[in-house]
Image (tube, grey):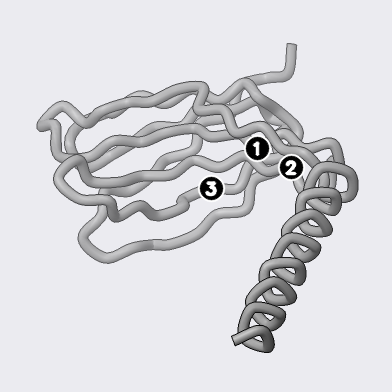
Amino acid sequence: MKRLLQVVVALFAVIGVAYTAFAVYANWFLPRCILASSQEAQSPDGKYFAVFEQSNCQDPGRSRATVEMGTLNSKKRIVWLDVKGTTDVRMTWNDNRELIVTLPESAVVKRYGPYDEWPQVIERRLPNQ
């Protein structure tokens, strides 16, 4: 019985040390990021939504901005665009099957898709101001 108690105490000590080490690592060494959804647009028929999300991190290499689309009746989401160089992203629906994303000319965009059975995304560029 004494041996079992020693094993249990040792096990809890190891778990406590591991948890403390992870907490110190997460708070001191991992770059902190803040997730912000800055704009959301719903399709006229209410079936789809699009959102511009930004993840701003202390380490700029981990920061990310995306235009994502999803369906309102499920948790399914897809990424249409990775956006760099701007936070000025505007979205409007032209109709139920076409999302227009307006960005400055200087924005660097990586495009994904096309995705079958999803509305298309059209990029419009505005002159830099």
Q: How crowded is mark 3: few (under 14 residues within 10 Å), some or many (20 or more)?
A: many
**Mark 3 — residue?**
81
How far apart in space, not on screen, are marks 1 and 3 (Cα)?
A: 14 Å
Q: In the picture, residue 96 is in which quadrant? A: top left
Name which residue lies at 74% across and 11% down.
Answer: 129
How far apart in space, not on screen, are marks 2 and 1 (Cα)?
A: 5 Å
Q: How crowded is mark 1: few (under 14 residues within 10 Å), some or many (20 or more)?
A: some
Q: Which mark identifies residue 55?
A: 1
In the rendered view, does 97 fall on the left or right side of 90?
Answer: left
Q: Given contact means CB atoms under 8 Å apart, are the residues at marks 2 and 1 in contact?
A: yes
Q: Which mark identifies residue 83?
A: none
Q: Which residue lies furthest to the left in this view?
A: 45
Give the x, y percent position of residue 112: 50, 59
Disc nearest the viewer among 2 and 3: 2
Q: Is mark 2 on a helix, strand or loop?
A: loop
Give the x, y percent position of residue 13: 75, 67
How far apart in space, not on screen, are marks 2 and 3 (Cα)?
A: 14 Å
Q: In this view, does 90 lie above or below 19?
A: above
Q: Which of 65 and 57 is in front in this view?
A: 57
Name which residue lies at 60% across and 47% down.
Answer: 82
